[in-house]
Each structure stands twice: as C-alpha cells, then as structure tokens.
C-alpha cells in the first residue's frame, strides 16, 4: 500500500501496459479453465487489483498534469495513458465477456454484488476496436483545451493572474475590485475564445462520430451510459429540470432579492453573489482549507 501524508508525496510510477494486457489475456484462459469458484474468484481479484492500480496511476498523473499543465513529464504521461488505456479496455472487454459467461458467475455475484456485473455488462458497450482512434483524439483535444485555458495571464492591479487568480479577486469585499476582476476575467477568455471554439468544435464532431461508431442514437445517449445513469433516462432528467424551473428557481430568486436588499445595491451581479451582507466577507477557499487542517 502506498503510505503518504500529502498528495505530493504519493509515488507515481508509469504502469507496464504490456504486462497488464498479458495478465488479462492469461486470466481469460484461467477463468475458462477454472474448476472451482475459489479459483475464479482469485483470478477475478487479481485483475481487479491490477485495474485499480492502473486507474490510480492515471488519476495521479491527471491531477498533477492539471495542477501544472506546463509540466512536460506529466503531459507525456497522460499521452501514454491516452494511447494505452483504450487498448487495455479492449483486453478487459474479452475478460469481462468470459466472466459473464462463467458457470461461477453467481458465486461472484454473491461476493461482489449483482450491480457490479450489471455495470460491467452495460459499460462493455462503450468499448470497440473501431473507436480507439477516436478516443485517443478526444483525450488529446481535452488536454489541449485545458492547456490552452491555463496559459493566458492578465495584468490586474500590479499582479499577473490567471483565471483562478481572477476568480479569487471576485471574492474581494471591495465591490469595484470584484467588478474589475470579472471584466478582466472576461477579457482574458475573449483573448483565447477563437482557439477554444476551434478545439470545442473538433470535440463535438469527434463525440458525434464516437456515438455513431458505437451504435448509439446520439452522444447524449452514449454519455448517459458512460456516466452510469442506469436507473433513469433523459425523460426523467427533463422532468427534473422542469421541477427545478417551477419550484427551485423562484425560491432562489427570492433569496437573491433578499441578498440584494441587504447589500443595498440596485442590481445583484455575478460578482456580488458570494457577499451575504455588507459586513460579511465571502468565505474564501483558503479559510475553508485551514479549518480542515
């Protein structure tokens, strides 16, 4: 087990993807030839442990890449995951098919729960050899989008601030500073709007293509499955949205109106929403973090 006290101390090691795929292939044969439920359970656990490690390392690399998009090491590591994980998933699809056809499936359901295998069977629909290139392209476009958004810096009252820095300024007790920060934030986004729009258009086309390749009606249907929305559909969500519009939005409007009156301002803007009263300071992220330490 990886023992650590802070995330920065968590050890990252690039997984051996070839060994991972080989283990999965061998495990398919072991499941087919297993003579006892104990043997199947042992193989199943070994593959699950390996998958957990792979995805843990992917998460660590992704977080560190997000923290600093200019770090070439973790950018390279993410590229490695983008190219290899779809291939690992193809091997896992064969393993999962074998598990679902095993005579010991009921024993595994007793051990892991039936929902685990319902999830497995449904998510297999998202894996296809014909879609690997599209997956890699999508991942690269998403990474490029985040990198593009993280790059620009604005001069704001003597400081160089990125989007996050400007968002913090939008929590300042001084309303003029909050307003100026919002305008600077908007201008900063406008400076990269064309680049972001270009990337986003490519993402839309890519995702439509993925849905078509995988046999879904549209991208929305594909993402409902990807997000594991097994017990409700888009009609349920449409009903939920309507309930929000009818019952929640009016209450929120009343709350904002009371807040506007407390603040003594003519109109409540986005940069005012964190201010509950003229005397109160917005609760900053740093304060919340300090209280948790």
Image: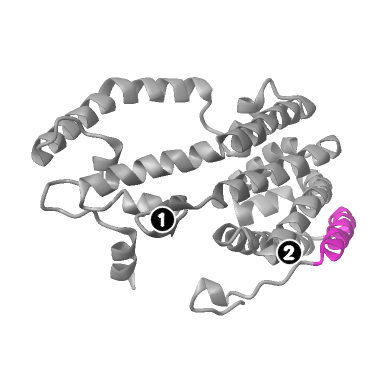
Front residue of this view, candidates 120 and 110: 120
User: Label 1: which residue?
Assistant: 165
Q: Position of residue 93 (x, y in %)?
A: 79, 45
Front residue of this view, candidates 205 and 53: 205
Q: Residue at x 64, y 42 (%)?
A: 119
Q: Position of residue 271 (x, y in %)?
A: 28, 41
Q: Residue at x 27, y 49 (%)?
A: 177
For the C terminus, give its image quadrant: bottom left
Front residue of this view, candidates 281 and 226: 281
Front residue of this view, candidates 125 and 146: 146
Q: Is residue 220 visible in the rendered structure shown here?
A: yes
Secondary structure found at label 1: helix
Examine the residues drawn in magenta and state their main secondary structure.
helix
| Residue extent of the magenta highlight | 16-35
Q: CA distance from mark 2 to mark 1?
A: 39 Å
Q: Residue at x 61, y 32 (%)?
A: 197
Q: Position of residue 230 (x, y in %)?
A: 57, 34
Whichever of labels 2 and 1 marks the residue nearer the N terminus, that label is 2
Q: Which mark is residue 50?
A: 2
């Amino acid at each position: 087990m990886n023992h650590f006290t802070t995330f920065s101390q968590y050890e990252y090691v690039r997984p051996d993807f070839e060994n991972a795929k080989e283990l999965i292939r061998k495990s398919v044969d072991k499941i087919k030839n297993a003579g006892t439920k104990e043997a199947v359970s042992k193989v199943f656990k070994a593959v699950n442990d390996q998958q957990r490690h792979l995805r843990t390392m992917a998460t660590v690399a992704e977080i560190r890449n997000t923290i600093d998009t200019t770090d070439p090491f973790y950018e390279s590591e993410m590229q490695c995951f983008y190219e290899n994980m779809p291939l690992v998933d193809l091997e896992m699809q064969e393993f999962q098919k074998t598990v679902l056809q095993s005579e010991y499936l009921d024993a595994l359901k007793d051990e892991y729960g039936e929902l685990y295998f319902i999830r497995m069977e449904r998510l297999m629909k998202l894996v296809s050899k014909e879609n690997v290139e599209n997956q890699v392209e999508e991942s690269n476009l998403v990474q490029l989008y985040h990198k593009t958004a993280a790059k620009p810096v604005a001069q704001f009252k003597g400081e160089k601030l990125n989007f996050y820095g400007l968002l913090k300024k939008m929590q300042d007790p001084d309303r003029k500073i909050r307003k100026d920060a919002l305008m600077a934030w908007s201008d900063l986004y406008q400076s990269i709007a064309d680049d972001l729009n270009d990337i986003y258009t490519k993402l839309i086309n890519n995702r439509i293509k993925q849905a078509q390749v995988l046999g879904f009606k549209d991208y929305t249907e594909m993402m409902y499955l990807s997000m594991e929305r097994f017990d409700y559909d888009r009609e349920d969500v449409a009903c939920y949205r309507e309930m929000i519009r009818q019952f929640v939005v009016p209450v929120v409007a009343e709350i904002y109106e009371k807040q506007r009156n407390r603040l003594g301002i003519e109109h409540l803007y986005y940069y005012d929403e964190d201010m509950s009263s003229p005397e109160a300071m917005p609760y900053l992220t740093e304060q919340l973090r300090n209280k948790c330490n």
